Image (spheres, grey):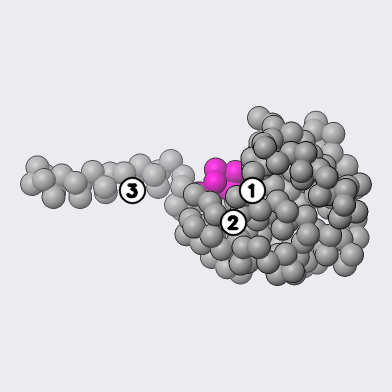
Amino acid sequence: GVDNKRAARESIGLPKDKVLIGTISRLATQKGHCYLFEAFKILKARVPGLSLVIAGDGPLKDELAELVRSLGIADDVIFLGARRDVSSILKALDLYVLPSLWEGLPMALLEAMATSLPVVATRVSGVPEVIEDDVSGMLVEAKDAKAFAAAMERVLVDSALAQRLGKSARETIEERFSATAMVNSMAELYLEVLEQNNVA
């Protein structure tokens, strides 16, 4: 609970008294950081005490740092660089965000959901297959900073909603991506293949 979150924040050197929104991904165009920063600027004007945590490295590093400065949000955006301690970062957060323009099925998203974090994500590629809008997370159209800000605000101002989304996110992962579920679906797949080849 609260103690775990505090310990995780201390171990990474993150502010203890802020509401932390975060994402873990390469700093590349497809990941949509620029729209997240615009959304965060809108959100910051409405909700006090927020910081945005960006974990990852990539070709846009300098460009994104410059964008953050020009938007006037540099004091509240923390670039962690490339990190291996993903589970500690996730434990430190209050809200996980995925602003991607296109995406496969990002491991960090599944890990965030497994950590019971509420998630706001873009409705792209494989994401709607794991997140049901308003049930196991909030889905927004890609490149829509205003809608992304509104979805983040909804989750942050309504702790019951945040809890419900986080709980449902974890249940989704347990049902669909746990080792047992994976083994069962692999077994089904093998049986199908065997049947098609008339081996079974």
CA separation in Å, label 1 and label 3? 34 Å
| Residue at x 11% of width, y 45% of height | 197
User: Front-most of 184 and 195?
Assistant: 195
For mark 3, give the secondary structure: helix
Q: Residues within 10 Å of mark 3 (few under 14, many from 20)?
A: some
Residue 49 lies in what quarter of the image? bottom right
Q: Which residues are the magenta region?
A: 105-112
Assess whether mark 1 and mark 2 are in contact (beta carbons under 8 angstroms): yes
Q: Earlier in the sequence, mark 2 or mark 1?
A: 1
Judging depth in this view, the residue of 60 and 81 nearest the camera is 60
Name the residue located 53 percent from the left edge and 51 percent from the top edge.
Answer: 103
Which quadrant holds residue 60? top right
Q: Which mark is residue 185?
A: 3
Q: Is residue 167 above or below residue 92?
A: below
Image coordinates for residue 27, horizontal then vertical, percent: 67, 42
| Magenta segment main secondary structure | helix
- Comes first in the chain, label 1 or label 3: 1
Does 98 sit above or below residue 111? below
Distance CA(mark 2)–CA(mark 1)? 8 Å
What type is the residue that disc 2 sits on?
A: Leu
Q: Quadrant of the C terminus?
A: top left
Query: Which kind of residue does numbered mark 3 sit on?
Result: Ser
> Where is residue 18 shown, x and y percent of the image?
88, 50
Say which residue appears at 60% left-offset and 50% top-offset: 30
Q: Secondary structure at mark 1?
A: helix
Q: Which residue is mark 2?
A: 101
Instruction: Name the quadrant containing residue 148.
Output: bottom right
Q: Which residue is mark 1?
A: 29
Relative placement, left or right, of 75 versus 107 is right
